[in-house]
Image: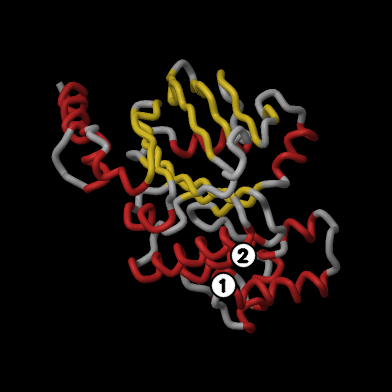
Amino acid sequence: MNAKNASPKISIEKLVKEFDGKTVLKDISLSVDAGQSLCIIGTSGCGKSVTLKCLLGLITPSGGSIKVDGLEMVGQTRSQREATLKKFGMTFQFGALFDSLPIWQNIMFRPLQQGDVTRQAAREEALHIATQLGLRADVIDQFPAELSGGMQKRVALGRAIADKPEILLFDEPTSGLDPITGGVIDNLILDAVKRLGATALTISHDMASVRRIADVVAMIHEGRIIWCGPASKMHESGIPEVDQFVHGHPEGPLTNKKTVTQQKAQA
């Protein structure tokens, strides 16, 4: 950030979320500066997706604060939240493309829904976005089922950036892809974020992807942030759980604890 005292683009403080008496998020505090790329890592079920859904207002937190550009999102009215969400673009883990719509309408779905563009102009813009993402021109008239997984990921990215959002959220962007295609998607993400000057927040299990796209990495464990720092330092965190996850070791506190829990359940 250029200004020393500028507020972060996204600020999450002491976020808590309970479901039926079970506390999933116990104390999540994160800060993402404008133009920064932050990746949240952690084992399955640790609360990564719940954190993202709280940020988007899809889930109401049980406690804590979420601010975007200094504006509190928790407790916003529906109209206030919708206005804030215009700053966001998102790709979902499994693409979430609309099967019944051709690719150009998928890419331009939000501008079309909002009435911000004519259908002809939308098709032309979709073509421009698709070619920027390395898709052939004729792809825009095809349907999602006709595309490979990697091509669908590109379309999902195209939809996320179509109305030039200030903040991009990525939910497991390389999930289900081979390493080469995953690397291509990461490069496209980096290029899109740079062109838009956007702030990026990603949740991922793919450490190769995290190394490529993250400026900062935060790890959630048992509902809390146990480490947050520069991506270049995550291999030397000094925290056993982080070390095991980052290096993919089969033995360590993350798996040993699960083994003990399983043994107790079977007893």
Where residue 5 sits: x, y (%)? Answer: 61, 32
User: Tag 1: residue type?
Assistant: Leu
Q: Quadrant of the N terminus?
A: top right
Residue neighbourhood size for the residue with mark 2, other residues' Cα within 10 Å, grouped as few (<14), some (14–19), many (≥20):
many
Query: Residue under circle 1?
Result: 133
Where residue 125 sits: x, y (%)? Answer: 73, 72
Using the image, tell me which numbered label, if any, was put on residue 107. none
The front one of 256 and 202 is 202
The front one of 156 and 29 is 29
Q: Quadrant of residue 233?
A: top left
Residue neighbourhood size for the residue with mark 1, other residues' Cα within 10 Å, grouped as few (<14), some (14–19), many (≥20):
many
Image point (14%, 39%), residue name: 251
Q: In the image, is 108 to the left or to the right of 209?
A: right
Image point (39%, 29%), residue name: 225
Residue 165, above or below 17? below
Q: In the image, is 112 to the left or to the right of 171?
A: right
Using the image, tell me which numbered label, if any, was put on residue 158. 2
Where residue 229 sits: x, y (%)? Answer: 38, 38
Residue 156 visible to an observer of this rendering: no
User: Tag 2: residue type?
Assistant: Gly
The front one of 213 and 80 is 213
Residue 56 visible to an observer of this rendering: yes
Where residue 261 sits: x, y (%)? Answer: 21, 25
Mark 1: secondary structure: loop
- What colouring does the structure picture have? secondary structure
Image point (25%, 45%), residue name: 235
Question: Are the residues at dot 2 and dot 1 in contact (C-beta closer than 8 Å)?
Answer: yes
Residue 110, above or below 123? above
Pick whichever of labels 2 and 1 is earlier in the sequence. 1
CA distance for labels 2 and 1? 7 Å
Q: Quadrant of the C terminus?
A: top left
Mark 2: secondary structure: helix
